[in-house]
Amino acid sequence: MSNVLKLAITGTIGSGKSVVSRVFGILGVPVYDCDSKAKMLMVKDKTIVKSLKRMFGEECYDENGQLNRSYLASRIFIDKENVRRVNALVHPVVKKDFERWALEQNCDVVGVETAILYESGVIDSVDKVLVVWADRETAIRRTIERSGMSRSQVESRMNNQMSSDELLLLSDYSIYNDGDEPVLPEVILLLEQLKSISNFAVSD
C-alpha cells in the first residue's frame, strides 16, 4: 500500500516506547521493530554475514549459523571505529527492509520502533515522529529491572544516545510514559489524528 503513513516510535532506553508500540499493535497498527529485525538480518542477510566474517572472523557465527553475540560484542565495542563500521553495514539493510515491509501492509498507518531513528537513517523513511519519554530515574530503573545491567552500564548507554530533550525538539508528537498513567487514551487519540491525515502526509 503505497500511501501508508509511516510513524516512527522512538525514545531513549527505558522510555517505555515498546509498551506504546504494543498498544498500537493491539489497535491494529503493525509496528516494525528495528532492534529485533536487525538481529534477524544479521543472521539471514548474506551480505551482512559475509561482511561480518570478513571484519571479525568466522567466529562471529556458531556451527549452526547463529550469531555469536558475546564474541561479536567483545570485538565491536573495543573500538568506536568498529561500531561505526558495523552500523554502516547493518543500518542501511534494516532501513531497506522496513521500506519493503511498509509497502506490503494493507492499512492507513504503520509504525517503526527504533531507539536510533536519526543515527540509523530511518528518519528519511518516515512521515511523522512520536517520542515516548519518561524521567531519567524511571528510565534507569526500568532498564536495570529488565536487563540486569548495572546503573553505570545503563547511564553509559544513555549518554551515547540522543537525550529525551533533544528528541522532543525534533518530534511531531510525544507521549509521557511514567508507568502510572495509562497510555491507551493518548495512543487512541493520536491514531485518530494520524488516520485523518494519512492521505496527505505521505512519503514520496
Image: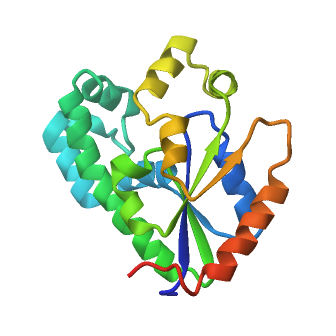
Does the rendering let one see residue 44?
A: yes
Residue 28 in view (yes/no): no
Occupied quadrant, residue 111: bottom right
Using the image, determine if residue 113 lies above or below residue 96. above
Residue 203: image location, x then y, percent: 43, 78
Left or right: where 26 falls relative to 106: right
Q: Identify the residue at horizontal 47%, vertical 55% (top origin).
A: 37
Residue visible at 56% across and 19% down in the picture: 149
Instruction: Pick whichever, 171 or 11, lies toward us.
Output: 171
Question: Where residue 137 sits: x, y (%)?
Answer: 66, 21
Q: Position of residue 92 (x, y in %)?
A: 29, 58
Above or below residue 52? Residue 23 is below
Position of the C terminus by quadrant: bottom left
Q: Image quadrant of residue 84?
A: top left
The residue under the point 35% across, 46% down is 119
Q: Residue 134, relative to residue 130: is it above or below? A: above
**In the image, 53: left or right of 28?**
left
Front position in the image: 26 or 68: 26
Q: Position of residue 139 (x, y in %)?
A: 64, 28
Q: Which residue lies furthest to the left in this view?
A: 54
Pick the front one: 62 or 22: 22
Q: Which of 22 and 165 is in front in this view?
A: 165
Q: In this view, does 37 lie above or below 145?
A: below
